[in-house]
Image: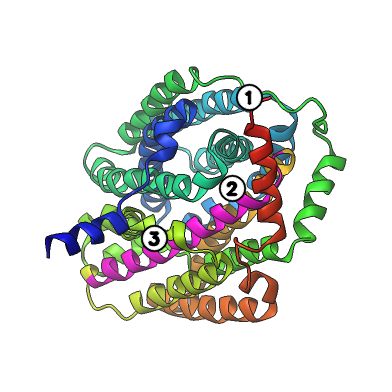
Amino acid sequence: MLDLARRFFRHFRIDVGPLRDSRDYRLMFASGIITMFGTFISVVAVPYQMKELTGSYLAVGLVSLAEFVPMVVCGLWGGAIADALDRRKIIVLSELGLLFTSLALMVNAMLPSPQIWVLYVMGAISTGIGSLQRPSMEAFFQQVVKHEQQAAAAVLSSLRWNFGAIVAPALGGLLVTSAGVAVAYGLDALTFLGSLVLLWRIRSLPPAEDAAPASLRSLVEGVRYAVGRRDLMGTYLVDMAAMVFAMSTALFPFLADQLRAPQALGLLYSAGAIGALIASLTGAWAARVHRHGLGVIIAAALWGAAVALAALAPNIWLVVVCMALAGAADMVSGIFRSTMWNQTIPSELRGRLAGIELLSYASGPMLGNARSSLMANLGGARFSLGAGGLLCVGAVLALGAALPSFRRYDARTDEHALAEKARRQVATQPT
């Protein structure tokens, strides 16, 4: 029995190889924990403050819609500069910009009459800055982590994300209802200061000597590469469909009130991350999966099904369970997508492709929250949850059928994965 237990835990234990082998990955990992802690508090504070100021489903949903255009424009441009400039410099300067937006939200919240337009404008600016930063971060991870450790790094990064996503929203819910949103924004600003101390110690990551300058032409080159690979397009389209149809966090402030559990608002925001954390802690098995495309399809369909079940839950606790199941499925999908990207995309294109990836995993939730708010206006929060979840399942299965090369992707035989593995092995050999 003891031997069986040991084999079980050895099978599910987390591979910390990337943390052990890469100093820069350790610094970025720690910085991410600090930053995300504050960011997730603001994720609760902004819609809560908007609800308190307007009492409108639509006004809350429009916060996400206001962030959409900056995310698209800055995400694509962020990918271009990530391949053309020093990635460390981009990350540090972006962190300073995000600190400014948090301070602006805090000052606005402290006014006798907080301005609604400030929430929209600062939300758009912070999203634009974060979208400029994200491609450099994604390219950074590929650059400092070994090829064979990319799956383990994806699990560790998801674990870091979930740590903040569980603790911070719960704390954020308590802060905004007891101490006020100004305190929440102030704490967010402090986390950016702590993060900057760590980011400053990361080594410079200059572009390759023959790197294409940031331009419209280089953006088009990246888009052409992505469109030419049906397996990559599958990761983008499936995730986009899953988020647009089933993302519903804009409904949480209203759902908590309808279920007569306003004190559980933070728990609703944390539920998905709790499920995702469980998936991350037991995620060592993901490194042994090679059919990543099929894994993404199955996980995205399960995400939609769990959201649809939440519409039928009679109390807040069953809603939390359903959202936790949805979060676990979404995290598994994210691990497989990240592994595919980092194991198959050439380094000189990684930044631009990360910008395109950002459009799928960031624009989807924004549009999904706008969609959920509009549907809630028509039929209520439960109607929006149930219909959105079912539409998600149908769309994901349809895309899986329409993209056979994505569905059949296998890291052991895929030409792009094998070519990138060989290239990195040559690059690491002593001269």
Q: Which of 183 and 300 is in front in this view?
A: 300
Residue corresponding to mark 2: 67
Residue corresponding to mark 1: 205
User: Please, which residue is most extreme toward the right here?
Assistant: 217
Magenta highlight on residue 321: yes
User: Within the image, what quadrant is residue 41 found in?
Assistant: top left
Report the magenta stretch's main SS.
helix
**Compared to 79, does 362 lie above or below?**
below
Magenta stretch, residue numbers: 318-347
Earlier sequence position, callout 1 versus callout 2? 2
Earlier sequence position, callout 3 versus callout 2? 2
Residue corresponding to mark 3: 285
**Compared to 94, does 65 lie above or below?**
below
Residue 35 appears in the figure: no
Residue 367 appears in the figure: yes
Q: Residue at x 47, y 30 (%)?
A: 22
Image coordinates of residue 259 in percent, x first then y, are 24, 69
Tag 1–tag 2 contact (CB < 8 Å) = no
Q: Which of 420 and 110 is in front in this view?
A: 420
Name the amino acid type tagged 2: Glu
Q: Residue at x 39, y 60 (%)?
A: 285
Q: Residue at x 34, y 55 (%)?
A: 269
Name the amino acid type tagged 3: Trp
User: Within the image, what quadrant is residue 349 found in?
Assistant: top right
Image coordinates of residue 55 in percent, x first then y, are 39, 57
Q: Which of 95 and 179 is in front in this view?
A: 95
Q: In this view, does 266 lie to the left or right of 107?
A: left
Image coordinates of residue 237 in percent, x first then y, are 64, 66
